[in-house]
Amino acid sequence: MNILGIETSCDETAAAVVHNGRDILSNIVASSLKEHQKYGGIIPEIASRRQMLLIHSVVERALKKANVKIDHISAIAVTISPGLIGSLLVGISFARALAFALAKPLIEVDHIQAHLYANFLQPRQPKLPAVGLVVSGGHSSLFYLKTFNRFELLGQTRDDAAGEAFDKVARILNLGYPGGPVIDRLAQKGKNAEIRFRCAELSDSSDFSFSGIKTAVLYHARNTKSPLAVEKIAYAFQKSVVATLVSKSIDACRKKKAKTLLVGGGVAANSALRKEFAEAARNQDIQVFYPPLALCLDNAAMIAGLAYHRVGEKEIK
Ligand code: KG4
Ligand code: ZN
């Protein structure tokens, strides 16, 4: 069964064709990131206008690349939430009209759950049940997954998302947008024990809080003039965020007796996070999974993939 997935929740316009929830036949992502960079963050109006212009050609490219005729698509899947409302509307309206015109089922998919599903779009297949950590620019959530249709929310951020904290700290340090990749790179040269930041612990809870550490970085940076300090600050900030994400996730695995940990979202690309998870998981006999780098970021393959498990369940005609 071939499913056409459409994803327009943030700045990307994405379409993909996935066979039987596993094989990616095509995965097209058009990003408007460059147009937002000078503002230091995503401007919703710019994003949705770009998506209006791009959606048709992106879907056509996905079908062409997959070498699948539109009549041979079994269902259309679309991101329903969360996301920017104008952007979501572009994808949902397009998918609805297409499903109606072709008389095919339309399957709504949750964007955050799909980020975790991206782990199943690779040869090494995770085993369920699992704990799932989604860390991106818009979300930081911990889930317990028994099946692809049962996602239990264990905790989430009470303020900023992890990626948002990276982006805001990068802004404080004048490093541009998005902040994650550049902080990741600078931190590798800034190892030190002089500067320490701490994330709020929120003990006994699987919730996160990242807004306090961003303010701590702001005050520290204001009082430091040395250019070398940027690398050290990046290191100390990243170390603390990573430590929180790792310890909350491993705790959740322990509580739920899960031996599989799935990580998803843009921050899953972080090198320190991967290193720390590898070490903690080895000690606890837990298997950690990440999607391939391109599938950590927003894409439509994860939407089409998860939708395969929802066929016949929640269809909107
Ligand atoms: O999943 P994604 O494309 O966006 C949302 O769905 O929100 O992730 C983008 C986020 C940005 O906040 C970016 O700074 C962060 O992921 N990110 C990283 C890294 N690469 C991207 N954060 C930390 N380290 C990285 N290497
Ligand atoms: Zn996302």
Image: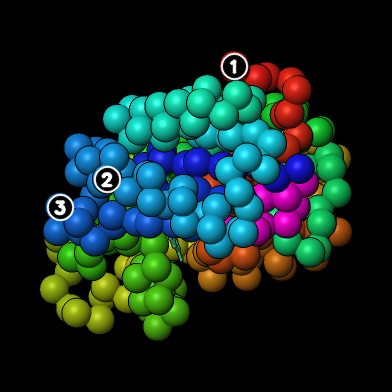
Q: Tell which of 112 and 24 is nearer to you.
A: 24
Q: CA distance from mark 3 to mark 1?
A: 40 Å
Please tell me whether the stretch drawn in magenta is mainly helix, strand or loop: strand
Q: Dot 1 corresponds to which residue?
A: 317
How many marks the image carries: the answer is: 3
Frontmost of labels 2 and 3 is 2
Q: In terms of image quadrants, where is residue 128?
A: top right
Q: Residues within 10 Å of mark 2 (few under 14, many from 20)?
A: few
User: What residue does disc 3 label?
Assistant: 39
**Which residues are the magenta region?**
18-26
Work out which quarter of the rendered image holds the N terminus and state it: top right
Q: Residue at x 66, y 57 (%)?
A: 24
* Residue visible at 40% across and 83% down in the picture: 189
Q: Which numbered mark, 3 or 1, is in the foreground of this view?
A: 1
Answer yes or no: is residue 222 visible.
yes
Residue contact between numbered discs 2 and 1, judged by CB atoms under 8 Å? no
Q: Is residue 302 left or right of residue 283?
A: left
Sequence-wise, which precedes: disc 3 or disc 1? 3
- On residue 53, the disc is 2
Q: Is residue 25 magenta?
A: yes
Q: Residues within 10 Å of mark 1 (few under 14, many from 20)?
A: few
Disc 1 marks a residue whose amino acid type is Lys
Residue 119 makes an appearance in the image: no
Element under label 1?
loop
